């Protein structure tokens, strides 16, 4: 779901940067209100690095083999830091690996980062449930992982279908969006399962790494 | 792969630019490239990118090798566009039709990708990452984000090694990643536990590193110290780049309106 | 081929290495023509300065790294790089790389489960490995929060569960406290497996391994009885090592009291 440079019209890239700027400002505001934001930076940065490395993992989803996106997991673990982590992660992917793009950094960050924030917030709200019950933890984990993927896929599909200057008949737009989103459903399922597994693991081994955890 | 810094120690006009000026000038040009749509502007755009590569003394192989993967991606997209878009039909391959519009668009997309990609590689390959991050901070990047960039960059290498070693060790305990033996633990589950464990051990390591930094006086928001003065060449570069960028955007607008 | 072991009786050759050469792309020859034999049940220390090639040697013996030249035979059978060998167990330097399950029990069971062994056989293997390493009471704990010594013994247990006959230990006593180190030494002395022990802890090597190989610059520069080798001051110093304190003659008082 990384959109490379060159495909999107300049105006869309600019709009993407504006949206990402807004989300960044919002995230910074929330993070700075925390007790000691600069204490959280090393943790958030290391977890960003873990995501970056983990996203290289290939999972075979026939007929292809795909990278995991893991933005849902990011939201579940980092909460409000998730958008910033995705921004930084995407920056590195574009600059170091030419995966994604620099002009499309804003668009990509918005597509992948906003769902992460949403999922993180919902996960945090549900803390009372999943803290007490492994079953709820699995449910929240699966829902978080798959929802983030579906929302990102939707955003990705809408942006591509409506802005890529292929003379695609406007009436075909809805079909295009639907088709592209449905194509991501298998990935969403795998991400859901993976996220649930990691959530269950962390809940057992170090629950304070999960966003919203209170003893 | 994470050796983008390999050529950051060269001596070239690009390397010698003051960091903020280099960042501003390149950013303006890259942004203007994103606006290009008209095929007439492809040549000047590619010419500018080529000039940047030449001026930076970076090896062409460095650029071409790294742009290979995204170009393949664009070519795949191109196939879709060429077959699916409208406009005059240039040729037929059995039931499929190759449309003129699609062909033109693929060309524009590929050229933009090459030009933007090359400029980005020159920009980030001509100075060590921390230098570029400091320049970004001076230009307004929040220190929290700047810190995240620097810390995660440092952490990648070790965490990459950790994951690789974990997978090797797991392989030595019988995991078959390609074809799981029936009855063996799920591979996705094993990966999930490894990722979870990476969180736990990296977090512990980060806490230790943070404590060490605190002992050396770090408190976030590290003061930047005095900036390098902007030399005349760098100032001229910024002015020139912005002018060219504006020119490209205006040209695109004019050609768009006319055509 | 047979060789004498400590007690003088002939033991079969377990491991045979001939003219082993390994190169990585960045550094040209990491191992140059390494040759040595290890008999069944023998414990051999592998010492040398950092960067000497010990870890690379171990990865080659385990079949992880492909040699550029030379042969490795275990029980007479050649080691094929890339194929999993159940009869060789490598204990990594950092226990965190071998412990990733939510409980120690699951980590130890991981190996046998990957071999699709029957559940009761898996339980038996787990119980045996936990008992041999003395960590049975840690079975339900999460390995990530254990102490260095506990992690070390647990990581050894995860390898033992596969019942390898050749064990390779890469810096097993690094960052262990005194008690844990002593537990490790007792374990090594009691273990019947053939063992290669790489360590900077020369006293441990002296205590556990009757024979020592010195590796430096990718070559075997010395191979013989541990006491003899480590007592050779000029040999030790030449290869970035020093004579262990226990071998220093205490004739002239040199401790500051």
Image (cartoon, coloured by chain):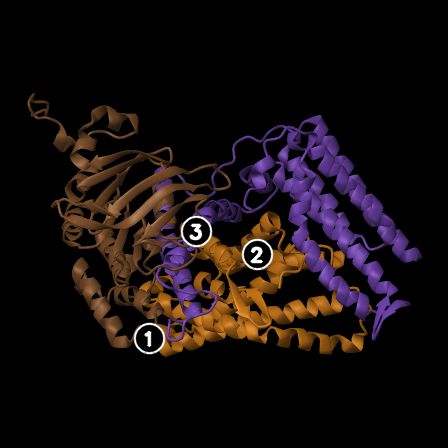
Label 2: few (<14), some or many (≥20) within 10 Å?
Answer: many
Spatial distance from mark 3 to mark 2, Cα to Cα? Answer: 26 Å
User: According to the image, label 3 marks what residue?
Assistant: B159
Instruction: State left or right for residue B149 relative to residue C237.
Output: right
- Residue B184 falls in image quadrant: bottom left
**Which of the chains is orange?**
A
B179 shown above or below A7: below
Label 1: few (<14), some or many (≥20) within 10 Å?
Answer: few
Residue at image location 27% in from the left, 56% down from the top: C155
User: According to the image, label 1 marks what residue?
Assistant: A132
For disc 2, the chain is A
Spatial distance from mark 2 to mark 1, Cα to Cα? Answer: 32 Å
Chain C, hue in figure:
brown
**Element marked by disc 1:** helix
**Which of the chains is purple?**
B
x%, y% of residue C31?
Answer: 40, 39
For disc 1, the chain is A
User: According to the image, label 2 marks what residue?
Assistant: A24
Instruction: Identify the mark nearer the N-term, 2 or 1.
Output: 2
| Residue closer to the observer: A94 or A67 | A67
Asked whether the viewer can see residue A166, the reply is no
Asked whether the viewer can see residue C151, the reply is yes
x%, y% of residue A117?
Answer: 52, 65
Query: Which mark's residue is nearer the viewer, 2 or 1?
Result: 1
Residue at image location 58% in from the left, 60% down from the top: A23
């Amino acid at each position: 779901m990384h959109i490379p440079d060159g495909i999107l019209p300049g105006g869309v890239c600019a709009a993407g940067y504006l949206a990402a700027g807004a989300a960044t400002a919002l995230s910074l505001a929330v993070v700075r209100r925390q007790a000691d934001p600069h204490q959280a930076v090393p943790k958030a940065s290391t977890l960003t690095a873990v995501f970056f490395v983990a996203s290289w993992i290939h999972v075979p989803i026939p007929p292809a083999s795909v990278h995991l996106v893991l933005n849902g997991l990011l939201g579940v673990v980092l909460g409000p830091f998730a958008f910033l982590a995705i921004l930084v992660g995407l920056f590195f992917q574009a600059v170091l690996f030419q995966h994604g793009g620099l002009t499309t950094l804003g668009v990509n960050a918005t597509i992948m980062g906003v769902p992460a924030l949403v999922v993180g917030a919902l996960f945090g709200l549900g803390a009372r449930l999943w803290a007490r019950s492994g079953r709820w933890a699995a449910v929240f984990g699966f829902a978080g992982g798959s929802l983030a993927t579906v929302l990102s896929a939707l955003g990705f599909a809408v942006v591509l279908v409506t802005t890529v200057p292929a003379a695609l008949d406007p009436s075909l737009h809805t079909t295009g969006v639907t088709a592209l989103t449905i194509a991501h459903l298998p990935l969403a399922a795998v991400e859901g399962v993976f996220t649930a597994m990691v959530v269950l693991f962390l809940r057992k081994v170090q629950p304070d790494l999960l966003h919203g955890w209170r003893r | 792969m994470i050796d983008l810094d390999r050529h950051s120690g060269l001596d070239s006009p690009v390397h010698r630019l003051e960091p903020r000026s280099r960042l501003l000038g390149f950013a303006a040009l890259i942004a203007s490239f994103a606006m290009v749509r008209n095929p007439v502007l492809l040549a000047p755009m590619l010419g500018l990118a080529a000039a940047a590569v030449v001026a930076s003394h970076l090896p062409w192989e460095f650029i071409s090798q790294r742009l290979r993967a995204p170009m393949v991606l664009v070519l795949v997209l191109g196939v879709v566009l060429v077959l699916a878009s409208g406009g005059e039909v240039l040729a037929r391959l059995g039931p499929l039709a190759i449309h003129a519009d699609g062909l033109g668009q693929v060309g524009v997309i590929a050229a933009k990708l090459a030009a933007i990609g090359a400029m980005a590689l020159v920009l980030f390959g001509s100075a060590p990452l921390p230098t570029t991050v400091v320049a970004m901070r001076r230009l307004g990047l929040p220190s929290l984000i700047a810190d995240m960039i620097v810390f995660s960059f440092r952490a990648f290498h070790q965490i990459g090694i950790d994951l690789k070693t974990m997978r090797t060790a797991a392989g030595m305990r019988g995991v078959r990643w390609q074809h799981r033996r029936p009855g063996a633990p799920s591979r996705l589950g094993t990966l999930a536990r490894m990722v979870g464990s990476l969180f736990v051990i990296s977090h512990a390591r980060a806490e230790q590193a943070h404590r060490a930094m605190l002992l050396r006086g770090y408190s976030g928001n590290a003061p930047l110290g005095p900036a390098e003065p902007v030399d005349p060449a760098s100032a001229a570069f910024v002015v020139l780049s912005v002018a060219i960028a504006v020119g490209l955007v205006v040209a695109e607008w004019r050609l768009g309106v006319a055509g | 081929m047979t060789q004498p072991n400590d007690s003088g009786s002939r033991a079969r050759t377990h491991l045979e290495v001939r003219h082993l050469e390994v190169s990585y792309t960045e550094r040209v020859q990491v191992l140059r023509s390494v040759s040595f034999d290890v008999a069944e049940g023998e414990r051999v220390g592998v010492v040398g300065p950092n960067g000497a090639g010990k870890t690379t040697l171990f990865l080659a013996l385990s079949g992880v790294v492909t040699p550029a030249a030379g042969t490795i035979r275990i029980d007479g059978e050649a080691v094929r790089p890339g194929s999993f060998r159940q009869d060789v167990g490598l204990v990594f330097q950092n226990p965190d790389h071998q412990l990733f399950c939510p409980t120690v029990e699951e980590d130890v069971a991981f190996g046998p489960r990957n071999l699709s062994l029957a559940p009761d056989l898996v339980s038996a293997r787990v119980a045996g490995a936990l008992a041999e390493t003395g960590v049975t009471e840690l079975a339900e704990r999460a390995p990530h929060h254990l102490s260095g010594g506990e992690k070390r013994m647990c990581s050894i247990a995860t390898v033992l569960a596969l019942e390898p006959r050749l064990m390779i230990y890469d810096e097993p006593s690094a960052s262990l406290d005194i008690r844990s180190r002593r537990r490790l030494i007792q374990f090594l002395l009691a273990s019947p497996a053939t063992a290669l022990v790489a360590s900077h802890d020369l006293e441990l090597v002296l205590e556990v391994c009757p024979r020592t190989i010195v590796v430096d610059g990718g070559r075997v520069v010395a191979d013989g009885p541990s006491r003899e080798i480590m007592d050779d001051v000029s040999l030790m110093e030449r290869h970035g090592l020093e004579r262990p304190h226990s071998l220093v003659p205490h004739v002239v008082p040199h401790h500051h009291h």
